Image: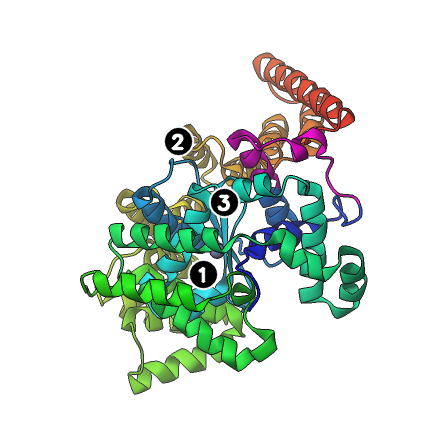
Amino acid sequence: MIRSTCAATFLALALSLAPCPSLPADELPELGDAARADLSPQLERKIGQRIFNDIRLHEASYVDDPEINDYVNLLGGRLVAASSGPAGSFQFFVIRDNTINAFAMFGGFIGVNTGTLLTAQSESELAGVLAHEIAHVTQSHLARQMAREKQHSIATMIAMAVGVLAARSNSQVASAAIASAQAGSVQAQLAYSRDFEREADRFGFQTMVKAGYDAHGMGDFFGRMQQAGRVYENNAPVYMRSHPLTVDRITDMESRAQNASYRQVADSLDFHLVRAKLRVQAGTPGEAVSEFGRQLREKKYVSEAATRYGLAYALLKTKDVAAAQKEVDALLALKLSSPMIAGLAAETRAAAGDRTGALNIYRNALQRYPQSKALVYAYAEALLAARQYEQGLRFLDSQLQLYSSDDQLYRLQAKTFAALGKRLQQHRAQAEAYLLLGQLGAAVEQLQFAQQSGDGNFFEQSEVDARLRELRKLQMEEAKEKKNGGWNG
Ligand SMILES: [Zn+2]
């Protein structure tokens, strides 16, 4: 068995770099001194943010679904709150990929594949996987590993990771990439020590138990993967290759679970709803309609609500609104509450042409779940569709007071301003959205459009001028940093 590694972390780097036209593999980011010096938490965050932005912008498999994002961030947040290490900010996201994988990047960005969400048989199993990755972050394993292997710059590691990813996804690219990156050394360079893997297991276990999940979840999931690994033989799940299971690790996990008191932990409703939604998205809506329909007829399901949800969601996707409404009614009759159920009910009302009914459902649901980003975005879209522009802007303003770094809120603001024909404000809002995605050039361009719009009052025009001066200054600083060979985030 190869050494314990955490190459997955770097695979994440590669994931963003490989398909990104601005960062081809042979033109890696200028890292300069930053690559050799110890990483400060600020620099780690900056690197992580940049990679995350690249994933969001260029990675087709990034799951851009606010409901699924809400769910993994709620679960992840609950675990982070129960973890030991210093509480930094964490961001969880999902990659549409059937293989089982999860990875931690610099700065608390943690990705998990849909394959992991669908393979986990309980929420505690999923919690175990995430808790392990959280521990890699709170114990600063990335930075510590880099300090151990000082001779390797971040740039070298990214270059090798690109090779690793290429080897996985495309055999033609693989041969060239492997030749240049020398696959043999990739393992060694990117390897986390066995100590770090065991430490992540230990801290991860404590975290999930403290957060109230079943102590056996972690071991159960690893056992399931080990079985999958046997099936796959040399083509083991990515997670197995990046976090190999040694006999020691399994023994440790088993004895820890045995010492913990047994408790039955119920899965959250949203765990099942998210899985049902992912199942529908994995195939055609028609297939999902017949599959969920069969499960309901034969009463073969873990959660009736999730099965009905999957059927209603699939029916809505086939545009059979009447049948979807019937299933939504049956789902609501179960008297269970979730922001996802409310969201589907509202979407179905809107599809039936009942805009007022949809808005009422969103308003009620937001009172109950004010933190649901999915409901916030959907409500703002619904107000836009109902041409209630002023109300939409007031709502988005109130949300921006709470979440000033949410680019999606700015995008919705820009759309609403556009519908009103307020072009200065539209470009101004779009500039902020680009800025939050790390696209400084595009943000400057939007402010220039705002200036040229011939729109807005004197006060608004002065604001645009001032903002443009700020961003140009930022552009100059970045150019200077780049010239000096620093990290240009
Ligand atoms: Zn690990």
The answer to whether residue 447 is left or right of residue 123 is right
Residues tagged 3 and 1 counted as in contact (Cβ below 8 A)? no
Q: Nearer the viewer, mark 3 or mark 1?
A: 3
Q: Is residue 200 above or below residue 483?
A: below
Tell me, for residue 67, which label it has, or none. none
Label 3 CB sits under 8 Å from any ligand 1 atom: yes
Regarding residue 316, the answer to whether it shows in the image is: no
Q: Which residue is mark 2?
A: 402
Q: Residue at left 60%, top 75%?
A: 235
Foreground residue among 281 and 217 = 217
Crowd band around label 3 with a 10 angstrom C-alpha radius: few (<14), some (14–19), many (20+): many
Cα separation, mark 2 vs mark 1, equals 30 Å
Position of the C terminus by quadrant: top right
Position of the N terminus by quadrant: bottom right
Task: Compare marks 2 and 3 and give the one earlier in the sequence.
Answer: 3
Q: Is 330 one of the magenta-colored residues?
A: no
Q: Residue at left 58%, top 27%?
A: 425
Dot 1: element = helix
Q: Residue furthest bottom?
A: 298
Tell me, for residue 351, which label it has, or none. 1
Q: Which residue is mark 3?
A: 141
Query: Can you tell which quarter of the image residue 169 is in?
Result: bottom right
